[in-house]
Image: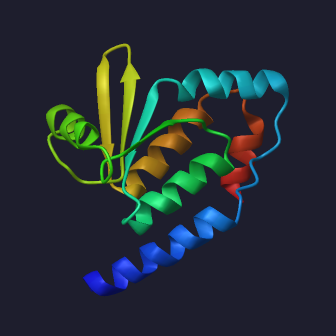
Amino acid sequence: MDLMRLVKAQMLNVVDRTVPVKPIQRSHEEQVLLNRESRRMHLYISHNCPASIELRRHCQRIGLNVVEKDVGRVNCYRNELIKGGGHSMVPCLMVDENAGRNWVYSPESIYSYLENRLGVLSALPALSKQSAT
């Protein structure tokens, strides 16, 4: 199982490096609002994790410019992840909110969080239409 995961990650890495992601086209105002939201988000990833690569590309596709932190390459990012979230599991989305930091683990939870969080913003109709299809 680990061998298959490693092979899948290597294949996705090749695709990630060679095939660019085409983001959703939005108006300038919509993208400014999305950029404001994305400044508060940090995505902890590993290039050896297929789910991390897929989630990173999904964020690029929807135009979300999150801060990416590769825990496989930089040990202080792994330490941040363990100290803040309590686990060294990737992918993980850390969101700075008014009430504090929210650590979202597992790809399904992150996709759901992004859909709910960005679906609330009425100024982003293109995103809610895209997620409905």
Residue at 72 percent of width and 51 percent of height = 130
Task: Place residue 101 in its image quadrant.
Answer: top left
- Residue 126 location (% of width, % of height): 77, 41
Q: Quadrant of residue 16?
A: bottom right
Residue 72 appears left or right of 8: left
x then y, percent, for residue 27: 85, 29
Front residue of 50/114: it is 50
Above or below for 107 versus 118: below
Q: Quadrant of the C terminus?
A: bottom right
Residue 123 seen: no
Percent x, y of residue 54: 52, 62
Indicate the quadrant where residue 75 lies.
top left
| Horizontal side of residue 80 vs 50, given as left or right | left
x and y percent of residue 33 in the render?
Answer: 67, 22
**Looking at this rendering, what residue extends furthest in the top direction?**
98
The quadrant of the picture occupied by the N terminus is bottom left
